[in-house]
Image (cartoon, rainbow, N blue to C red):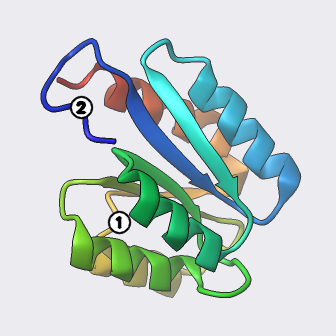
Amino acid sequence: MKDAGLTNAKKWVLVADDAPEIAGRVVDLVSSFDNLEPIGPARDGHEAWELFQKTAPDMVVLDFHMPGLTGLEVLQQIRQRDGDCVVVVMTSSNERQIVVRCLTAGADYFVSKSAMQDRLPEILRKFATAA
């Protein structure tokens, strides 16, 4: 749902996380910004990919560990189709290898779920105010 360059237009954010409480917090956070609109949440990787194809969001907040397609697999598919979509990958794992794999695959941001309360609002604020 690309906004064709209109600065006041809504920016669409696909939320994908199989943990309902995390997905709900992310949807609520996205909704707290006037010009951001949540899509989803997708509960697994297949649903995330389907919603991405149907909606062409401006941003995706993607859990790394999901059933079906993993977050990394969804990220790789997103990058094959859309190089401009901003992708935030989240995980509860602190393994450096996961961070490196996601950033190498094209993630714009990587957020530990333990730091989500501080880091994700900052990323969304930056995204919401970008032209």
Q: Which residue is mark 2?
A: 3
Q: Position of residue 127 (x, y in %)?
A: 34, 32
Measure how far apart labels 2 and 1 are at the Cα level: 21 Å
Q: Picture quarter containing residue 126?
A: top left
Label placed on residue 107? 1
**40 above or below 44?**
above
Q: Position of residue 57 (x, y in %)?
A: 39, 48
Q: Secondary structure at mark 2?
A: loop
Task: Count how many numbered circles sit on residues in the image.
Answer: 2
Label placed on residue 18? none
Q: Is residue 100 visible?
A: no
Check disc 2: other Cα within 10 Å, few if <14, some if 14-19, many if 20+: few
**Placement of the C terminus among the 4 image quadrants:** top left
> Reading the chain from its start, which is encountered first: label 2 or label 1?
2
**25 above or below 79?**
above
Q: Nearer the viewer, mark 2 or mark 1?
A: 2
Foreground pick, 32 / 103 = 32
Q: Is residue 47 visible?
A: yes
Q: Secondary structure at mark 1?
A: loop
Give the residue type at disc 2. Answer: Asp
Q: Position of residue 129 (x, y in %)?
A: 30, 19
At x 24% / y 79%, what residue is drawn? 80
Q: Position of residue 88 (x, y in %)?
A: 45, 55
Q: Picture quarter containing residue 63?
A: bottom right
Q: Farthest residue in the right direction?
A: 21
Give the residue type at disc 1. Answer: Ala
Foreground pick, 2 / 93 = 2
Check disc 1: other Cα within 10 Å, few if <14, some if 14-19, many if 20+: many
